[in-house]
Image (spheres, rainbow, N blue to C red):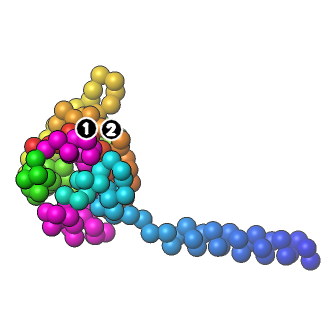
Amino acid sequence: MKNRCRKFLGAVTLLLLMGSYTTTDAQTVLEVLKSNGQTSQFAAAIERAGLDDRFDQRNGSFTVFAPSNGAFAKISASEKNNSQLILNHIITGTATKRSLQHMSQMTCLSGLTVEVAQMDNNSLSIQNYPLIESNIQADNGVVHIIDGVIQ
């Protein structure tokens, strides 16, 4: 009787754990940007430019090369509100760091073609700006933080 009770409790515990795992909502790329202390200014710029609906949806997949707050703070207010400048940092599809290592160029949503380069220390740069952090997963893509603003 005790074994049956233990098995039953074990099964119930497993189901509860699985249920809480599967009901956890993943974040969109915009939510990831807003919640990250290094990219919150870029997230605010996306919202000010009226692009938030586009990137806060789960239909579509995006790779965002988000400027760090330090890099983004160095540009003018008018540049921060420029939707083309914001779109310079986003491509369609999910490109992890591993897949970026096999690319030399990519076209951003703005139409700008940017370069991907392997640096001496085996890290990557996007348009000569090193990746600070990479592969931050979102429900609708991936975010990489770069140390610069693509213009």
Disc 1 to disc 2, C-alpha distance: 6 Å
In this view of the protein, can residue 54 be seen by the observer?
yes
Q: Where is residue 135 in the image (x, y as percent from the top left)?
A: 37, 47
From the viewer's perspective, tell me whether residue 118 is left or right of residue 88.
right
Q: Which of marks 1 and 2 is nearer the N terminus?
A: 2
From the viewer's perspective, tell me whether residue 22 is left or right of residue 30.
right
From the viewer's perspective, tell me whether residue 137 is left or right of residue 54.
right
State the extent of the magenta-drawn residues as a range: 46-75
Q: In which quarter of the image is the N terminus?
A: bottom right
Q: Does residue 144 sit above or below 7 in this rendering?
A: above
In front of the other: 83 or 115: 83
Q: How many labels does the image show?
A: 2
In front of the other: 25 or 79: 79
Residue beneath disc 1: 147
Residue under the image location 91 percent in, 73 percent down: 2
Residue under the image location 23 percent in, 53 percent down: 42
Residue beneath disc 2: 132
Circle on res. 115: none
Q: Position of residue 5 (x, y in %)?
A: 85, 76
Q: Quadrant of the C terminus?
A: top left
The local secondary structure at tag 1 comes to loop
